[in-house]
Amino acid sequence: MGDRKVISIDGMGGDDAPGIVVDGLERFAKRRPDLHFLIHGDEAKLKPLLASAPNASPRTTIRHTEKFITMDDKPAQMLRQGKGSSMWNAIEAVKTGEAVAAVSAGNTGALMALSMFILRKVEGLRRPALVASWPTRKGVCAVLDLGADIDADAEQLVEFAIMGVAYARAVNGKANPKVALLNIGSEELKGHESIREAARLIRTANLQMNFHGFVEGDDIVSGEVDVVVTDGFTGNVALKTAEGMVKMVADMLRESLKSGPFSMLGALLAMPALKKFRSRLDPRRVNGAVFLGLNGVVVKSHGGTDGVGFEQAISVAAGMGESHFRDEVAENLKRLVASADAISPAIAPSQEAAK
């Protein structure tokens, strides 16, 4: 596809693929006429759908394969048997340089395993992280790690912070993102040793980072910071808790508004405000989690999303693919390594004296 910027798409991943995939693609193509697309999947199913997508069709190439990964397939099994599937081929296009980013709404475990296997980790980075944007009172906040790994030591938390800041610039448009570490309190002495050590490393490593310090769980949605960093176990629990809480509030509000004739009348009068409320909490607005720390961009869309949500996932992929994300991460990793090298000689004598 020459020098054109291309987004690679798994056309068969997701609960309602390929319909919602092409719907999202058409929505995105309508507002981004400068990009092109490579969609992987069953041509017999994709071609009729693209025929009804006038904005996407002229700029989309179908790469046929009848093989695809289901939501029930085991990640380890797909490492052995997934080659040639729509998901594998979508990621492979990023590795070969044919596309700047890949998007899939398919099996999360398989997508993570294949992405790490095909693209490999960035040199100097110990672990990848999964990041997504959360709605806040003031816009959105990038939160990571959301479950790529269950724990993280101090240096890994700093690496997550470096990647989170670069992501916030590329995807959320934050010129100088304010970053914080998730803790059980904002005081300097709170939290376990790895969190406190991570804060010390950030302050002493001369990183290009606007570091806020510690925040608590309820601060994530306040909008006071743009990036919140934590380990994968805590991040995933926080994510699932937030999703459950939003669903509960929405269900309780719906039940209350239907509880009687006066409630229904009040709901009718408040409909404009209710629509605005629903829009602000709409998970489709922030759909699209990114596997950070790989030699290429892979975006995971929620498997149960619709065309609006998938459009947002493609938008995240485009933002990452067009950014200087990897250059910024590499520069700050160098600063972190240089700081660690400078600190090590000073620590060694004191450790020897202690013996």
Image (cartoon, rainbow, N blue to C red):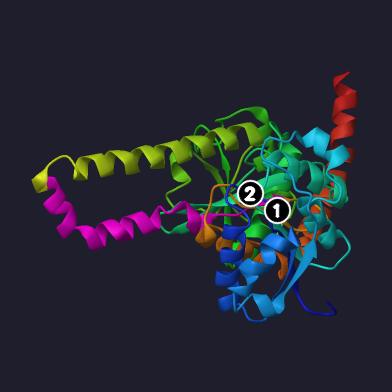
Residue 131 disc label:
2
Q: Which residues are magenta?
A: 263-291
Name the residue at 78% across, 58% down.
90
What secondary structure is the magenta-colored segment mainly? Answer: helix
SS for dot 2: strand
Question: Where is residue 21, by image quadrant?
Answer: bottom right
Q: Give the amino acid at mark 1.
A: Met
Question: Where is residue 326, by image quadrant?
Answer: bottom right
Label 2 environment density (alpha carbons within 10 Å; few <14, some 14–19, many ≥20): many
Q: Is residue 282 above or below residue 259?
A: below
Instruction: Check disc 1 and report the residue beneath it.
Output: 163
Left or right: where does residue 288 sit relative to residue 98?
Answer: left
Left or right: where does residue 79 sit relative to residue 263?
Answer: right
Q: Nearer the viewer, residue 230 or 300?
A: 300
Query: Which of the image's four quarters has the C terminus?
Result: top right
Q: Nearer the viewer, residue 233 or 342?
A: 233
Q: Is residue 79 found inside the magenta-colored segment of the image?
A: no
Q: Is residue 264 above or below residue 316?
A: above
How much space separates mark 2 and mark 1, taking CA atoms? Answer: 9 Å
Name the residue at 71% across, 39% down.
109
Left or right: where does residue 156 sit relative to residue 236?
Answer: right
Residue 195 visible in this rendered orientation of the protein = no
Q: Nearer the viewer, residue 170 or 38?
A: 38
Q: Give the amino acid at mark 2.
A: Val
> Is the Cβ of the residue at disc 2 closer than 8 Å to that at disc 1?
yes
Label 1 environment density (alpha carbons within 10 Å; few <14, some 14–19, many ≥20): many
Q: Position of residue 119 (x, y in %)?
A: 85, 52
